[in-house]
């Protein structure tokens, strides 16, 4: 449940940015009073990402200091990076918007340009905080070992024994290093994440704010609403990952739904239907063919450089689709080209993974949450059964791996964190005004799963945007209008722009 595009940076830059979180030079600001949990906000300099973020130039930054594990009073504290981005309006509304990023593990600050471009700070202050373990936090739960595996993986079969061996070694090494550094891996979970945001509101002295989260951030927002409802004026969730449903087998139903919707949208456009009359059959044929006889290619990256040894098999093909590479409107054309012996679009996308910005994604947070909250209660056999239910004609070797989470059960055996399924898999019932936004082309968090969430939110408005994939708001001007209207009038947002929306035309290539 990561971002709709992949962005990261170097480990050296990350260390430099962490060093920037001392007190701001010449600042007259003082730390906030210590709250009941021991949390406090300490002003400081803003992070300095490798690629400058314009909005940080006018932001007020610092870090929230909180207990690492709230169940262990007197334990060590951690620091979470915070930025307060001012509203563009001269007379902004008094209630800010606080953002909860996807992932888990994605760099929250990396999302700021998308948020600003989407108008999140047009009428209100925008508050961004890195979830515990993120890039600019102390500690940072990055796993450079896993990043280096991802660089190697493009030249290996997606689900090959060699890939599994290297991945498990990377997880073993990362875990050992983090534990040796004193990290309590059991403390990096959604309950603690939610408590961090509750402490942030109190530490900043904000009486009331609005919440916006996407993907894993929607799961976090629902947990926050359930466990810390005070001071929440409204909640908007985008590309919903329902806390009561998210498990590793669940990923297959979401992936299947998104792919079905893309193919159905093509069938609804005469030109696309005539040119690509049987996309489901074509996809199954290519998955089976590539899994039986993988292609090994030397691929020149799009940005140039030396050719990269690239293996394209059935598992790799499926996961490229889930990662939106190529984009949904190009998918029929890419599959048609592949069926005619031209794998260039998929091969280029696979080869792009050979360049990782090492040390910027908090794989440690990902594994702590996945292994404590998503994996328990199910087995590898359950993942395979869920895959077979959706795609009975696909090879077991493809279906045995949860989309985008290969070898997660063996990794969880290494990661060894406590089972938190009963704590986390709980529906959120609330009368706080809510906006639930989904995209029909979402292959990570299927749009239909948002219905059950909305039913428990008694004052909710649901919006489904046709032809848009994961993380809807940055991709849809209409969704941006709806979100702005919702924050202005949470119980009566204007959703009229959705009426009549249709997916954009698909790419049609000559026969």
Image (cartoon, rainbow, N blue to C red):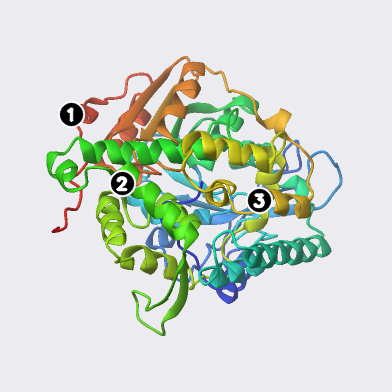
In the drawing, what numbered circle is on residue 475?
2
Q: Residues within 10 Å of mark 1 (few under 14, many from 20)?
A: few
Residue 393: x %, y % from top left: 46, 42
Q: Is residue 459 above or below residue 316?
A: above
Quadrant of the frame with the C terminus: bottom left
Mark 2 falls on what kind of element?
helix
Residue 237: x %, y % from top left: 45, 33
Q: 187 or 1: which is nearer to us?
A: 1
Q: Are marks 2 and 1 in contact (CB under 8 Å)?
A: no
Is 240 situated left or right of 176 in this image? left
Mark 3 falls on what kind of element?
helix
Residue at figure coordinates x 58%, y 35% from the top left: 246
Mark 1 falls on what kind of element?
loop
In the drawing, what numbered circle is on residue 500?
1
Numbered disc in front, either 3 or 2: 3
Q: 280 or 209: which is nearer to us?
A: 280
Q: Where does label 3 land, which residue?
A: 408
Q: Is residue 107 above or below residue 194?
A: below
Q: Residues within 10 Å of mark 3 (few under 14, many from 20)?
A: many
| Marks 2 and 1, the one that precedes in the sequence | 2
Q: CA distance from mark 2 to mark 1?
A: 17 Å
Q: CA distance from mark 3 to mark 2?
A: 30 Å
Q: Residues within 10 Å of mark 2 (few under 14, many from 20)?
A: some
């Amino acid at each position: 449940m990561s971002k709709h595009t992949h962005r990261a940076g170097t480990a050296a830059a990350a260390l430099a940015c962490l060093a920037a979180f001392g007190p701001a030079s010449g600042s007259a600001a003082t730390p906030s009073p210590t709250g009941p949990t021991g949390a406090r906000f300490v002003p400081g300099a803003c992070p300095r990402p490798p690629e400058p973020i314009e909005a940080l130039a006018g932001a007020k930054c610092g870090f929230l200091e909180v207990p690492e594990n709230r169940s262990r009073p007197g334990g060590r504290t951690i620091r979470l990076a915070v930025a307060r981005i001012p509203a563009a309006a001269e007379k902004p509304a008094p209630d800010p918007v606080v953002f909860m990023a996807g992932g888990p593990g994605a760099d929250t600050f990396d999302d700021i340009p998308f948020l600003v471009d989407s108008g999140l700070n047009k009428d209100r202050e925008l508050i961004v905080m890195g979830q515990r373990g993120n890039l600019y936090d102390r500690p940072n739960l990055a796993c450079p070992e896993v990043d280096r595996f991802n660089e190697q993986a493009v030249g290996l079969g997606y689900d090959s024994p060699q890939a599994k061996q290297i991945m498990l070694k990377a997880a073993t090494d990362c875990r050992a290093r983090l534990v040796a550094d004193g990290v309590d891996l059991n403390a990096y979970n959604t309950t603690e994440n939610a408590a961090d945001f509750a402490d942030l509101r109190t530490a900043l002295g904000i009486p009331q704010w609005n919440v916006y989260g996407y993907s894993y951030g929607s799961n976090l927002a629902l947990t926050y609403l359930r466990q810390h409802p005070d001071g929440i004026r409204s909640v908007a969730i985008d590309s919903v990952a329902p806390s009561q449903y998210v498990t590793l087998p669940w990923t297959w139903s979401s992936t299947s739904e998104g792919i079905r919707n893309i193919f159905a949208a093509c069938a609804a456009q005469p030109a696309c239907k005539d040119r690509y009359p049987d996309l489901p059959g074509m996809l199954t044929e290519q998955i089976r063919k590539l899994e039986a006889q993988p292609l090994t290619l030397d691929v020149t990256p799009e940005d140039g450089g030396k050719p990269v040894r690239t293996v394209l098999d059935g598992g790799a093909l499926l996961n490229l689709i889930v990662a939106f590479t190529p984009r949904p409107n190009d998918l029929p054309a890419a599959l048609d080209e592949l069926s005619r012996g031209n794998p260039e679009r998929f091969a280029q996308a696979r080869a792009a993974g050979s360049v990782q910005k090492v040390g910027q994604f908090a794989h440690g947070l990902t594994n702590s949450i996945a292994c404590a909250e998503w994996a328990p209660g199910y087995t590898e056999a359950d993942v395979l059964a869920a895959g077979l239910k959706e795609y009975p004609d696909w090879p077991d070797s493809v279906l045995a791996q949860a989309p985008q989470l290969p070898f997660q059960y063996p990794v969880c055996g290494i990661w060894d964190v406590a089972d938190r399924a009963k704590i986390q898999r709980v529906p959120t019932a609330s009368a706080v005004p809510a906006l639930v936004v989904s995209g029909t082309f979402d292959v990570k968090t299927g749009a239909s799963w948002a219905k059950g969430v909305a039913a428990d939110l008694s004052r909710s408005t649901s919006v489904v945007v046709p032809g848009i994939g994961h993380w809807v708001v940055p991709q849809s001007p209409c969704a941006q209008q709806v979100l702005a209207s919702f924050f202005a009038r949470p119980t009566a947002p204007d959703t009229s722009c959705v009426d009549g929306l249709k997916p954009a035309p698909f790419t049609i290539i000559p026969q």
